[in-house]
């Protein structure tokens, strides 16, 4: 080990200089960190202000765009509502005209039959007119059961559609 007595004269000789140098270094480092903090804070504050301004501009533009899109959507909804009301009124008027006459009375079947006279012998000449090819008259005909069921389904569908249109018209009014 080094004797303490040998180090004491060196410590006494250089202690003041080392202490002053150490205090100066601590003060310099302190000033550096203080300056660095000030510069950093100024830069940080400037960056925050820049981004806040950018965000405020973006929010303003977004609000304007949202307002414009909302106005366009409202106009489109209004147009669609008017179209729906007009279409419903047109359908209701059509079905009101149709419903003035019951559906069964409007549905009829025609069958073409040859024009016949009382004379069973064509071309006999006596007693009436002869049957001429190509002439026909309309007569009521009986539908087959399957066709009658299909016709009844169609009639029910028409009546249900009419009821739905009347319901929609009442809802709109």
Image (cartoon, rainbow, N blue to C red):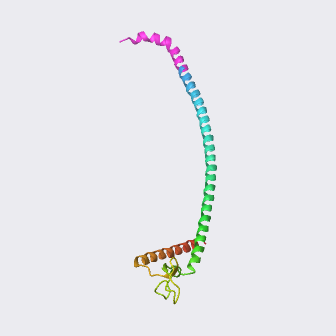
* Residue at the bottom extreme of this rendering: 127
Q: Nearer the viewer, residue 168 or 122?
A: 122
Most prominent secondary structure in the magenta stretch? helix
- On whether residue 12 falls in the magenta region, the answer is yes
Q: Residue at x 38, y 11 (%)?
A: 3
Q: Nearer the viewer, residue 1 or 4?
A: 1
If the image is split into quadrants, where does the C terminus sit? bottom right
- Can residue 172 be seen in this snapshot? no
Left or right for 64, reference 99: right
Position above or below: 161 against 8: below
If the image is split into quadrants, where does the N terminus sit? top left
- On whether residue 117 falls in the magenta region, the answer is no
Position above or below: 125 against 47: below
Q: Residue at x 62, y 37 (%)?
A: 50
> Dividing the picture into quarters, in which one does residue 148 lie?
bottom left
Left or right for 5, reference 160: left
* Residue at the left extreme of this rendering: 1
Region rendered in magenta: 1-24
> Where residue 66 sits in the image (x, y, percent)?
61, 51
Position above or below: 122 against 39: below
- Can residue 22 be seen in this snapshot? yes
Q: Residue at x 57, y 25 (%)?
A: 31
> Where residue 150 sits in the image (x, y, percent)?
44, 75
> Where residue 69 sits in the image (x, y, percent)?
61, 53
> Where residue 143 sits in the image (x, y, percent)?
44, 79
Q: Nearer the viewer, residue 110 or 99?
A: 110
For the image, the number of numbered tags is: 0
């Amino acid at each position: 080990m080094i004797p303490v007595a040998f180090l004491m004269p060196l410590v006494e000789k250089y202690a003041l200089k080392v202490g002053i140098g150490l205090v100066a270094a601590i003060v310099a480092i302190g000033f550096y960190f203080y300056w660095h903090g000030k510069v950093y804070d100024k830069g940080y504050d400037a960056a925050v202000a820049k981004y806040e301004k950018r965000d405020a501009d973006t929010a303003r533009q977004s609000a304007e765009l949202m307002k414009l899109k909302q106005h366009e959507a409202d106009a489109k909804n209004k147009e669609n509502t008017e179209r729906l009301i007009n279409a419903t009124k047109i359908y209701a008027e059509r079905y009101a005209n149709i419903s003035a006459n019951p559906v069964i009375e409007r549905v009829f079947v025609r069958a073409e039959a040859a024009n016949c006279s009382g004379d069973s012998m064509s071309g006999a000449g006596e007693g009436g007119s002869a049957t001429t090819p190509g002439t026909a008259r309309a007569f009521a005909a009986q539908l087959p059961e399957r066709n009658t069921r299909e016709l009844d389904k169609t009639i029910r569908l028409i009546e249900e559609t009419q009821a739905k249109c009347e319901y929609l018209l009442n809802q709109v009014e």
